[in-house]
Image: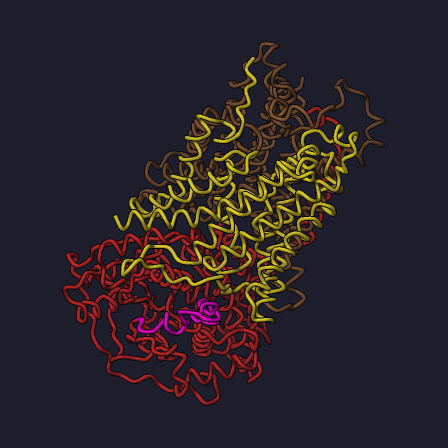
Chain colours: A brown, B red, C yellow
Amino acid sequence: MTLVRHVATAAVLAVLLVIISSTVSPFRDYQMAEVACYVVAVAGLTVLVGLSGQISLGNGAFMAIGAYAAALLLLHLHWPLAVVLVAALAVAAAGGAVVGVAAARLRGPYLAGATLILAVALPSLALRYGLLGGDQGLTVVINSPGFLGPSFSLTRWQAWLTCGCALITLVLLANLARSRVGRSWRAARDDEVAAALAGLNVARLRVLAFVVSAACAGLAGALLAVTTSIVSPGAFTVTLSIGLLTAAVLGGLGTLPGAVWGSLVLVLVPTYVTDVASSHGLSSSVGSNIPVAAYGVVLVVVMLTFPDGIQGGVHRLSRPLASRLPAWPGAPRRRPPGPQFRAPASEHQEEGSL
Amino acid sequence: MNRSHRVGLPALAAVAALAMVVSACSSGSSGSGSKSTSGALTASAPGITATTITIGSHQPLTGVAAPGYDEIAPASNAYFDYVNAHGGIYGRKIVYKYLDDKYDPTSTVSVVKQLVLQDNVYAIFDGLGTPTHLAVAPFLNSEKVPDVFVASGCECWNSPSTWPETFGWQLDYVREGKILGTYIKQHFAGQKIGYFYQDDEFGKDGVKGLDDEIPQADVVSRQSYDPTNINVGPQVAALKASGAKVVVSFTVPAFTALLRLNSLKLGFSPTLVVSDVGSDPITLAGLLEAYAKQGGATVSGNQLTQGIITDGYMPTLGDTSNSWVALFKKIHDKYLPKLPFDGNVAFGEAVAYTFVQAMLKAGKNPARADLVKAIESGLPQGPAVAPYAYSASDHAGMTGAFIGVIKNGVIVKEGPVQVTNTSATGAVQSYTGTQPTAPSSGMP
Amino acid sequence: MTEFRELTLGGISVGMIYAAIALSLVLIWRATRILNYAQGGMAMFTTYIALLVINHTGSYWAGFAVALASGLVLGGVIERLVIRPAENKPPLNAIIITIGLLVFLEGLAGILYGGQFRSFPAAFSITGLHVGSAALGVSANDVFVAVAVLAAALLLAAGFRYTSAGLQLRASAFSPPVARLLGVRVGRMLTLGWALAGLIGALAGVLVSPSTFLYPNSMDSIFVLGFTAAVIGGLDSPAGAVAGGLILGVALSYVGGYLGSDLVPLFGLAALAVVLMVRPSGLFSPAATRQV
């Protein structure tokens, strides 16, 4: 029943998105496509960080893997797009498995540090090998498929493609989160020892979470490559990885609608603030830095006023409305999602007395 | 995940509301392309109205690539302000919309699509950066938007068959490498040469040009650097260990300064040959200023740049008798008093001057194609020291540069301008023509 | 041999900068269990303030002192205003807040001072020191940097161990409720922790800015490597921060000199991976074993 409900919601949203995309200008189509790409990546990250409790500052690296895989396959092997997307997803998932295994014993800030340097190091590989296009990157060109007609707008097709993939990803992740795997993740996140005692293979669960989140990031990277038509190291900086995490937490960690809110903020807020700043005709260095400073303020203020993110705020506001809906089973959250930064056990031994 | 059902309804409502807001914001119109034969000014193309011409650009205004480069667009804007104050282009004012792409190709695609699809600019002007502009060149060409005077020395902008709308402007890095390489071959024959270059297309193209001229046996060390890693000590140590007596560097000013400072620490003093972008004496002086001011200092700023050999494709800013320098300084002093009058500002004004030249040639009521045709029919030499090579089959731009030496903080020209092409076998020859003087009105 | 010596000494001097950033991260981690992603940004901002003072007064040491003082104040103010309200919320919120703070500080620096490179003076001569006619490959300023960071690390370690404030700081981090019961003003200790971290970060900023030139994003890549050094050394150990910084600085110097600069980030990753495989909590952290 969960699956049917999720698919039905996705179908309704799909119809809505098709209608919106058909009425708005090509630029808004492009923005929809951008948002959809980020939704895929942020959704994967929110599952990793929120449900499985592992902080990753390096999902941009998995996006890079997916993007480069897609670009190389399209350029050299000319595979059909659907196959390329799945292949890119698989390659990134493999990368996620490697990182997950290597990082299985790392916790909290150590995992954060490791994934951060991963985000820096992996794109630099592209500079070393000519096959990967070096600094200039690889150009990716796709066409809208034949069955839509020869004059179908490419931007619209990109919007449909990315939104479709985003909806499929959200449905799959929603099911995964509701399944035994999702519950196991939450159990291992909340108390690792208890979960292990209960028979869960914590290490395997952690690696699986990395694989899932890397697969999503890889798909998102491939979609981004197809939407922006270029894959280069400059597009996968640390800023991207940090942006994904910011979007996940800002939107509401551990929730899928939160991934949507976060992606909308990530794409739309900087553009909006830039428009406001430039329309006031300020001097260049002041005018161009105001959006930057403003974005920082937005992050701090939202996190302080909505500790559960935007989705938490929406939930609070919709509670009066929801109280009229039939109740459903589900225990209220006791522990916040995300990694728990506790003092290491050894400190108890090191400092025996105060 | 329990929430997905509960907030399904509010989520749908929010998405629907967002959709309505978004469609309300979307703009639609595009201008007609007809050419008017009467004297009246018409909206002859997207971005052109009876009173304005709107052009757009993508620039790194914030982020790690911003220092220095963030001066170029304001400088171009200053020149456009000057033109607007003196009658504009056939009476139309230029509106220059430049957006920040933080040197991230994904952002570049976003802002350029915004400029073209939403703001309906007439042309994209002076897009800065190679990886960033490569992300949008295919889009601009498929949308048939003129993509003029890209701010990058990549030879890739010269592809009239694949990218008919795209034009380069500044001297490309391969030509620069060849010109510098020829000078080194002539003056430092047989000595050990070391390369120090940025590990992107800027440095690699420069090295390609150098290798076309300098015998391979003379090159004893090739060290590259990543602009995000300021620790170039290891590379300088490697250069020193190789025994190089001449170091050729394709670096941005910050890294030229770092090369010098690290060499000072290691007691390494080769002859330094630096490409144009990295040798601007005013920028270098600014970077090394603190070492000059220190009480009891053992080094001074000027001393650190003395003797650097470089090339230049525009008149040197220290040559105040040059009419172009005087014009650009006048405009800088009036419109950009807070910025230093350095190479970036001169670059911005010069490329803006070239744009105005092209627009005047395009006619009173130009369509987009008229701008392209105007440039392809050839542009008269302006602030550049060598003529442009624009034609239907050549979209590259400048063809040559002079060699100069920094003496007491200014570049002193040495010898005639050298011109060449980008092929490995193309000869480097002297150009004997003289640069035309700047128009007294300041407008082409 | 000369190149090896030069690479080693150069690696040590840059490694001490990573160590300084690592120290401030360790301090905040030990005191408040938060990852301060804005550490580099705070250092950059206080260095701008120092530059203003230096340009106004012409005295380097006045600027140095003001930088340290403003680091102290900035750290304390940030903890009180922005971090304290997030105290009982999910820990990831605090990280996002520090990210927001970093972006804000970089934007503010751009607005106030402009985006161009600024030259920042060094405390002492940057010309290489010589023994006879042979250049050692290190300058007087490099020696100062190393001594300053080491002094800061030692003072910090001594402070933690031997002073009452240090004891209270550790107690507040270890168990705030128990510390409160024993009369420790936990809130003040958290502020003190951040203030000290701000001070050490400011020290790192003024020490490194002569080599990086000062601009709003100048500390970004230094921060990443400082963070890596902190993780290598163990986030709970000031000694580890210094060790991690030195190891990273020297190792990357060898890679850059002998193998090529494009391999440096990869080797940074490799070094981290190797250390964490063997000791998942860093080299100097007490081994946390929770085998079931």
| Left or right: A107 as drawn, with respect to C212 | right
Which quadrant, please, contains the N terminus of chain B?
top right
What is the quadrant of residue B91 in the picture?
bottom right
Instruction: Specify the principal SS of the magenta part.
Output: helix
**x then y, percent, for residue A329:** 76, 17
Which quadrant, please, contains the C terminus of chain B?
bottom left
Give above or below for B355 relative to A265. Answer: below
Give above or below for C113 relative to A5. Answer: below
Tell me which segment is drawn in magenta: B284-308
Residue B102 visible somewhere in the drawing: no
View extreme (bottom): residue = B440
What is the quadrant of residue C88 in the picture?
top right
Magenta-span inclusion, residue B295:
yes
Residue in front for this viewpoint, B140 or B190: B190
Residue in front for this viewpoint, A127 or B356: A127
Residue in front for this viewpoint, A59 or B29: A59
**x then y, percent, for residue B336:** 55, 76
